[in-house]
Amino acid sequence: MAVLITFFQMLALLLMIGGGCLAAKTGMLDEHTNRQMSRMIVNLFSPLLVISCAADSVGTIPLETMGMVMLIAAGVFAVFIAAGAVMSPLFEKNRDQRKIYQMMFVFSNLGFIGIPVVSSILGEQYVVYVTEFMLVNTIVLYTYGTALLDEKFSVSSLKGMLNPGTAAGTAAVLILIFEIRLPDFIKTAVGYLGNVTAPMALVSVGFSLVHADLKKIFKQWKLYVFAAVKLLLIPLVMLPVLRMVTDENALILVCMIMFGMPVGNMPLLLGTQKGMDGTACSAAIILTTVFCVVTVPILLAAAG
């Protein structure tokens, strides 16, 4: 029964993606509008959702649990970094493309897809855990990620960590640690704006699907293997270790969702910025996003 509930929740998200496809097909949503929507999601609505969830969770989440989630997130990124280093040569011989594959193993769509999935399946009170994963993701991206592509570490790259998402995540942690209670009128405003995140993000994904060459994407067999390894194999291997760390079922479910998120946009954006071919990365983003509709319920069923 739980598997069916999760599957139908994922289908609901897929229908919202379908709404984006319809808007793009009928001309209601063009590239400029989608770009502006994406900016609002990343810089306004998603950060406000994080703060809203933290404000609603004041006094309900033990500090020990928050610390545990941060350690789990750090451990997971270490595993994905190691997996990317070992497995990327199996998918690509070209030096630059191997780097892209390593980035795809490590950096998932935790915010754009992770927040809607966690909030719709488990409830908005668990989005605060997603925030901790996103904070670790940001730190790893602008340290390991930039060093991998540049083949050296640059202090200037750390400036990229100064963004609304990091600021909101930091604010959320402080709200929870010091049990800061926001006035009701602020919570209401922030909550309404934050709730825009999930549907708008999924509409934007639908726009991307319409403008992708799906026939070309679904003919690349090695991307199917990559998707199976990233979305299923590695998360399932990490599940027994996760059970040794915590027996809190809700936390295990959140972590399994985070483990199984599709490839994020940052490998594509950073790779393109360095002049690398982003074709395989674009295809992997679309393919893994579609596949997670099926793989997430499998992971949650395995987690119990």
Image: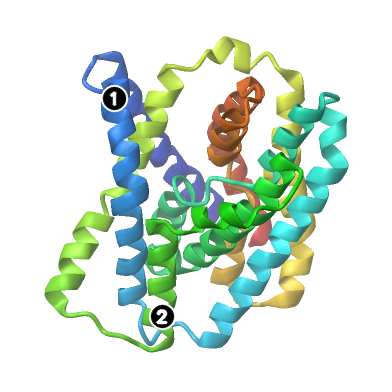
Of callouts 1 and 2, the N-terminal one = 1
Rendering coords of residue 256 (x, y %): 62, 58
Q: Residue at x 65, y 47 (%)?
A: 146
Quadrant of the rendered image containing residue 168: bottom left
210 sits to left or right of 72: left
Rendering coords of residue 251 (x, y %): 57, 70
For badge 2, the amino acid type reads Leu
Name the residue tied to disc 1.
32
Q: Residue at x 38, y 87 (%)?
A: 59
Eyeballing the image, is 245 above or below 140?
below
Rendering coords of residue 51 (x, y %): 33, 68
Q: Secondary structure at mark 1?
A: helix
222 sits to left or right of 205: right
Quadrant of the rendered image containing residue 177: bottom left
Look at the image and tell me whether residue 257 can be seen. no
**Label annotation for residue 174:** 2
Look at the image and tell me whether residue 141 can be seen. yes
Name the quarter where the C terminus is drawn: bottom right
Counting other residues with Cα less than 10 Å from the Cα at mark 2, is it few (<14), some (14-19), or many (20 or more)?
few
**Label annotation for residue 118:** none
For badge 1, the amino acid type reads His
Counting other residues with Cα less than 10 Å from the Cα at mark 1, is it few (<14), some (14-19), or many (20 or more)?
few
Eyeballing the image, is 102 above or below 206?
below
Q: Nearer the viewer, residue 85 or 277?
A: 277
**Inter-mark Cα distance, 1 to 2:** 36 Å
Eyeballing the image, is 101 above or below 189?
above
Q: Secondary structure at mark 2?
A: helix
